[in-house]
Image (cartoon, grey):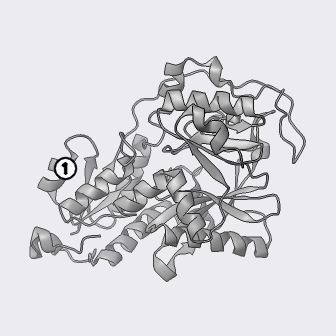
C-alpha cells in the first residue's frame, strides 16, 4: 500500500473579534463609493493587535479541512499526518512516505510556502504541487507580475514601495484610483476597502499603515474597474485544464462595500450562519470572454511553473480585457459546499467531487514523478533515494 504523508498547518482556535462593518448607502451598479464617503471597513477602528491577530493564521487550514483531505487521500493509500511544525524535518525523515500531499502554507518569511517542498526535495521524497521556486515567486506579487509582463501576459501596472519617502516618485506614472496591498501575503490579508485609494493623501496614509504593521513592502497597482473572476486549474503541461470559471458577485456584499474581495468579504461578512452568495459558477459570460480568460489563466499557470493545481485571479480592465491579478499555487480547498472555496466549487461544477479533486491532484503529482500509487510494495522495494524521482 502506498504511504502518503499529509503536510499541513492547522489553524488555531479562532479569536472572536467584533466585525468592523458599518452600514452605508449602496452605490449603483458600476459606481464606487467616493473618497469623501466612509468605507464600511474601519481599519483604524480596530487596535493594531486586533487587526493583526484576526488575519495572522488566515491561510492555515481548519481541522475539518485537514480531516476531509486525509479521508480523501485514504482511498489511495495509508495516510500519516505531518504537521509543519519545527520537528517536521525529523518526522519526515523518519517516516519517509512514498509521496507527500502538501497543503502547508508555512509561517515565517517570504519563502514560507516553499519550506515543506524544499525539505521534501532535500530528503528525496516526492510531493504534490508546485516546487519551492514557484511557491516563493508567486508569494512575491511584484516578481509574479514582472514575470507575467515579460511573457506578455496582461497584469495591472504597478510599483513597489519599501520606504514611504519613495511613494511619490515611484507612483508618479500611475493613475488614480490605485489599489494597494502587502507584497508577501495571501488570503486577502491586509486588503480592505481602504486599499482602494482615490487621492494621494489617502494613498500615503494607507501605505504608511501597511508598511508599519505588516513590516514588508507594499504593492501599488492600477485599479481595474471591470468584473473579477477566479479560475481553478488542474493538471500539467498541455493537459492542464481550466475548470468552470467562478465569477465574483459583489452585489452580495454589505451596503456601501466596494467591489473587491477583501479580508472582510472572506472572513467577516461571510459567516456559516449568513453566507454570502459571492461566487457564481459557471460565470455568466460569453464564450469569447471565457476563452480569453482561460487563455491568460493557462499562460500564467505555465510561465510561472505551477504544477498539479492552482487558483488564478483575473479582473477585466476598462476595455474588457482580462488581466491576471494574482496566482496562488496553494489554493484553498474547503470541503463544505456551503463555504465559498473556489477550487472545490469549480470542481463540483465540472462534476468532480471533493474526494476526487484531492485524489486527482495526488495522481497528477505521482504521474509526474514516477510514483506508482497502485504498487503495494513500493516503499519496501526501493531504497529511500530511489523510491521516486525528485520533483
Quadrant of the rendering where the N terminus is positioned:
bottom left
Quadrant of the rendering where the C terminus is positioned:
bottom left
Outermost front residue: 169
Q: Is residue 90 left or right of residue 247?
A: left
Q: Is residue 209 above or below residue 11?
A: above
Q: Is residue 226 above or below residue 13?
A: below
19 vs 259, nearest the viewer: 259
Picture residue at 40% right of the left edge, 45% below the top: 110
134 vs 282, nearest the viewer: 134
Circle 1 — which element? helix
Q: Is residue 184 left or right of residue 41?
A: left
Picture residue at 63% right of the left edge, 34% below the top: 264
Q: Is residue 233 left or right of residue 177?
A: left
Picture residue at 17% right of the left edge, 74% below the top: 378
Q: x%, y% of residue 347?
A: 56, 64
Q: How many marks?
A: 1
Label 1 crowding class (10 Å Cα cut-off): few <14, some 14-19, many 20+? some
Q: x%, y% of residue 301?
A: 52, 68
72 vs 300, nearest the viewer: 300
Residue 270 in sight in this render? no
Q: Is residue 47 above or below residue 191?
A: above
Residue 268 lies in what quarter of the image? top right
Q: x%, y% of residue 198?
A: 78, 36
Outermost right residue: 28
Residue 74 in sight in this render? yes
Residue at image mark 1: 89
Q: x%, y% of residue 326?
A: 58, 55
Residue 387 lies in what quarter of the image? bottom left
Amino acid at each position: 500500500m502506498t504511504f502518503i504523508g499529509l503536510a499541513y498547518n492547522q489553524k488555531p482556535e479562532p479569536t472572536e473579534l467584533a466585525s468592523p462593518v458599518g452600514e452605508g448607502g449602496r452605490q449603483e451598479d458600476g459606481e464606487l463609493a467616493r473618497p469623501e464617503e466612509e468605507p464600511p471597513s474601519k481599519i483604524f477602528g480596530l487596535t493594531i493587535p486586533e487587526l493583526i491577530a484576526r488575519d495572522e493564521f488566515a491561510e492555515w487550514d481548519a481541522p475539518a479541512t485537514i480531516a476531509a483531505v486525509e479521508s480523501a487521500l485514504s482511498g489511495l493509500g495509508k495516510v500519516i499526518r505531518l504537521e509543519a511544525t519545527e520537528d517536521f524535518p525529523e518526522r519526515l525523515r523518519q517516516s519517509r512516505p512514498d509521496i507527500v500531499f502538501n497543503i502547508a502554507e508555512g509561517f515565517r518569511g517570504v519563502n514560507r510556502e516553499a519550506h515543506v517542498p524544499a525539505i521534501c526535495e532535500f530528503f528525496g521524497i516526492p510531493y504534490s504541487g508546485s516546487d519551492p521556486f514557484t511557491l516563493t515567486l508567486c508569494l512575491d506579487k511584484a516578481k509574479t507580475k514582472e514575470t507575467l509582463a515579460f511573457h506578455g501576459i496582461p497584469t495591472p501596472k504597478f510599483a513597489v514601495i519599501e520606504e514611504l519617502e519613495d511613494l511619490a516618485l515611484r507612483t508618479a506614472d500611475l493613475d488614480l484610483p490605485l489599489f494597494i496591498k502587502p507584497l508577501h501575503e495571501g488570503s486577502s490579508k491586509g486588503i480592505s476597502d481602504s486599499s482602494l485609494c482615490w487621492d494621494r493623501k489617502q494613498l500615503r496614509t494607507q501605505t504608511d499603515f501597511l508598511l508599519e504593521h505588516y513590516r514588508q513592502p507594499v504593492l501599488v497597482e492600477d485599479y481595474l474597474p471591470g468584473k473579477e473572476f477566479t479560475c481553478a486549474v488542474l493538471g500539467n503541461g498541455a493537459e492542464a485544464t481550466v475548470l468552470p470559471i467562478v465569477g465574483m458577485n459583489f452585489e452580495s456584499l454589505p451596503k456601501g462595500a466596494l467591489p473587491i474581495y477583501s479580508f472582510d468579504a472572506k472572513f467577516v461578512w461571510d459567516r456559516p450562519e449568513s453566507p454570502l452568495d459571492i461566487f457564481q459558477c459557471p460565470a455568466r459570460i460569453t464564450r469569447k470572454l471565457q476563452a480569453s480568460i482561460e487563455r491568460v489563466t493557462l499562460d500564467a499557470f505555465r510561465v510561472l511553473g505551477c504544477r498539479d493545481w492552482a487558483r488564478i485571479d483575473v479582473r477585466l480592465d476598462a476595455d474588457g480585457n482580462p488581466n491576471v491579478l494574482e496566482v496562488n499555487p496553494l489554493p484553498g480547498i474547503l470541503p463544505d459546499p456551503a463555504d465559498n472555496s473556489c477550487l472545490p466549487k469549480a470542481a463540483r461544477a465540472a462534476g468532480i467531487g471533493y474526494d476526487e479533486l484531492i485524489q486527482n491532484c495526488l495522481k497528477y503529482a505521482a504521474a509526474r514523478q514516477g510514483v506508482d500509487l497502485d504498487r503495494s510494495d513500493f516503499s519496501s522495494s526501493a531504497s529511500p533515494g530511489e523510491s521516486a524521482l525528485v520533483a
